[in-house]
Amino acid sequence: MSKRQKDIVMSLMKEKEPVTAEWMAKELGVSDRTIRTEIKELQSQSSSLGIIIESVRGKGYLLEIKDYELFDREINPNANDAINENQSDFSEQENRVLYMLKRFLLEKEPIKLESLEEELFVTKPKLQTDLKIVRELLESYHLKLVSRPHHGTQVEGDEYMKRLCFSNYILRRNSNLNIDSNSFHLLDQKLFEKIKETIIKKVNEYKIEISDIALENLATHITIGCKRIEEGFVIENLEHDLTGKYPFEKIVANEIVKEVEEFTSLTFPKSEIDYIIVHLLGTKLIHKNTLNEFSKFDELGTIIHCMLERLKTELNWDFQDDSEFIQALALHIRPAMNRLRYNMNIRNPLLDEIKRKYPSAFEGAAIASRCIDEYLKIEVGEHEIAYIALHIGVALERMKARKKKEKRVLVVCASGVGSARLLYYRLQNVFKDEIDIVATTNYYQLKEYDLSSIDLIISTIPIKEEIDIPVLVVNTFLGEGDIANIRKGVSSVKECEGQSYLNKSKVFIHKDFEDKESVIRFMCDELYKQKLVSKDYVNLVLEREAVAPTSFGNLVAIPHPLTPETEETFWTVCTLKRPIEWTDKHRVQFICLLNIRKVPEDDLERMYKKLIALVENSTTVQKVIKSESAEEIIKILNES
C-alpha cells in the first residue's frame, strides 16, 4: 500500500457512516478523481489486505475489516520490508524528505544534488521543493544546509543538534514509544540492548526513578553517540557549564560511560559525558525520598505555584489541595524544564489524540505552560503541553469524582415488601455511585415521612399529593425507559443545549480566505463590530494559535483566545468555499471560534464535549459545510 492508500484507509476506518470521495479529497488535499482511482485499486486487492470497501450508492464508501491480523500486517509492514532502502516509495514526498535528511545527517562528505536526483528518480524542480522542507526541518534545530560549487551540499551546525534531529526524525518509534525494529539497520541493535542493560543496572543501584520512555531515549542517544564518535564526530562543549553543578548525575553518567567504553573500546571525551548528564537531567531522574517535599524557594515551587494560581483564576479549577496532582507536576516539570533549557525537543506521539479527547485539559495545560514560558523565556511546544494535559486530565477526573454528590432517594412501593426489595436492589445495582437509597416506604406511610433531606422520590405508583420533591414513577422491574428517566432525574446539571451558544449574527457562510490568519481576523472583526470583544481580541486568538494549532482533523478548527474575555460563552461559526491549510498536517473548511466567558462556569467541560462530539462526526461537518443559510447551520448543530 502506498502512503496515500494508507491515508484513505485510515480516513475510512474512523467513520461509521459511508464517506464520499469529495470529502476525502478535501481532507487529503487531492482531487476526487485521484481518490476514486486509489479506491478502485484498493478494492481490487481488498482480499489480500483483509478488508472490504463497499461503494454505497449516493452515499460514498464504507470500510469493513474482515481479517484483523492480515490487515495489521499490511498497514504496519514488518521490519524486513523496510530495511532495504531501495524499497522506499519515493513517489511520496515524506519518504524523499526523510531519505535526504538521513543522508545529510549521516554522510561525512558533501552530497551532490545530481546524485540525489538519480537516487530519488525526481526532477530538479521537485528536488528543490523537497529541499526547502529539509531546510526548514534542519532550521528548527539551528542547523544549515550549505552548498559549495563543485563540491556538493552538507549540513553545518552543532553536532548535539544533529543527533537530536536524527533521533526525532529518522528513528521511527512504535506506539509504545520504543524504537521501531525497522530503525535498527541504522543503529547497532546488540549494542543498544547492552547499553540499555547497563543503564538499568545503574538506575537500580542508585535507586533512581526513570520512566520507560526516558530509558529508551537515553539508550538511543548513547548508541547514536557511539556511532558518531567512531566516525570522528564529537560533540563540542555544551553552552552551559556543568562542572560541579550536578554531582549525582555526574557519578551515574561516568559509571555508565566506563562500562560502555569497556565493551566498545571507544573513548568518550568530557563533552560527551556532559551530554549524557544533560540526558539524565531530561529524564524523570529524582531520588524517591526527595519527592515528598519540594522546597518553596526552589524554581519548581515557584512554577507550580504559578500554574495552580493561573488554573484557579482563569478556569476556576482549584487544585491547591490535590497533593497527587502537585506531586505528578513536580515529577514532570523539572525534567521538562531541563529538556527546554538544553533544546531537547521531545515528540509526543499521542498529541492529536490528547487534543481531541481531553480538549479542556489541553487548554488548561496551554494556560499553565505560560508559567514556564515566562520563567525560562523559552517557548513550550505543543508536544510538552500535551504531557502536562495528561496530568491535568487526571486531576479533573478526581475533582469530578469528589464533587459528584449522591442523590438521596426515597423508594415508594404500593405492594408488599418483596417488590420493594426487588426495586431497591435493582436501583442499587444500576445507580450504585449516583444515588443513596435512604429508605423504602409504603404509599400510605408517605404522609408521615420527614422529606426534608430527600432529593428525589422513586415510586411504583403515581403520587397525587402536592409535595415539593421531584417524583419519578417507574415499573417495579425497571425497564430501559425507566432507567433513562431516572438518569435524567439524577443528573443535577442540565445538559447544555447548542442553541445557547449559537446565534444567527455570529454565523458566516462560504467565505473565501487564503489562510488561517485572514479567517481569524475576519471573525474577530465581526465580533468587534458587534461590540462583543475588544480591538485586541484578535491578538489573543492568534497568540493562542501560536502556542498549539487548534485544528482537530475532519476539516475543523476551533480557535479561541488565550485568556477568556467575553461576558458570555458563545460560538462564532464560519464555513469556507474551499479548504485552506491550517497546519502542515490539517486542512480546514469549518471554523468554530470559541468565546469563553470571563467568569468560568462548571459547564466548560460539557460545552467542549458537545463541540468535540459535533466536529468528530464527519456527516455533521459535511452538512454544515454544504449549508446555504445560518438557520440551517444552527439547526444541524442543535440537532446533532
Image (cartoon, rainbow, N blue to C red):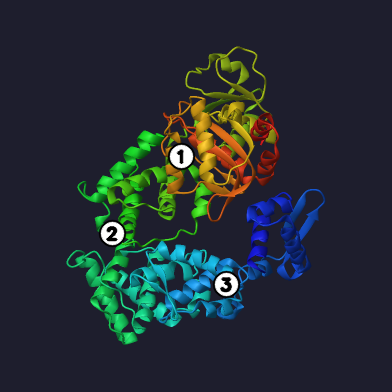
Q: Give, as a three-letter code, the residue at label 1.
A: Val
* Residue at 47% in and 21% down: 453
Q: Is residue 362 above or below residue 97?
A: above
Q: Are marks 2 and 1 in contact (CB under 8 Å)?
A: no
* Badge 1 element: helix
Task: Write down the residue under mark 3.
Answer: 124
Compared across the picture, whether 419 is left or right of 586 comes to right
> Which residue of the protein is positioned furthest toward the right in this rendering?
57
Task: Give residue 442's position: percent from left, percent from top.
Answer: 61, 21
Q: Earlier in the sequence, mark 3 or mark 2?
A: 3
Within-10-Å neighbours for mark 2: few <14, some 14–19, many 20+: few
Above-or-below relation of 474 to 371: above
For image coordinates 30% across by 42% down, the residue present is: 306
Give the residue type that dot 2 points to.
Answer: Lys
Q: Residue furthest top?
A: 466
Foreground label between 2 and 1: 1
Q: Are marks 3 and 2 in contact (CB under 8 Å)?
A: no
Question: Which of the 4 image quadrants contains residue 508?
Answer: top right
The residue beneath circle 2 is: 288
Q: Observer-nearest residue: 116 or 363? A: 116
**Residue that lies at the very extreme toward the bottom in this rendered image:** 265
Mark 3: give few (<14), some (14-19) or many (20+) Cα within 10 Å.
few
Disc marking residue 211? none
Helix, strand or loop at mark 3: helix
Residue ID for mark 1:
541
Task: Give SS at disc 2.
Answer: helix
**Residue drawn at 48 percent across, 18 percent down:** 452
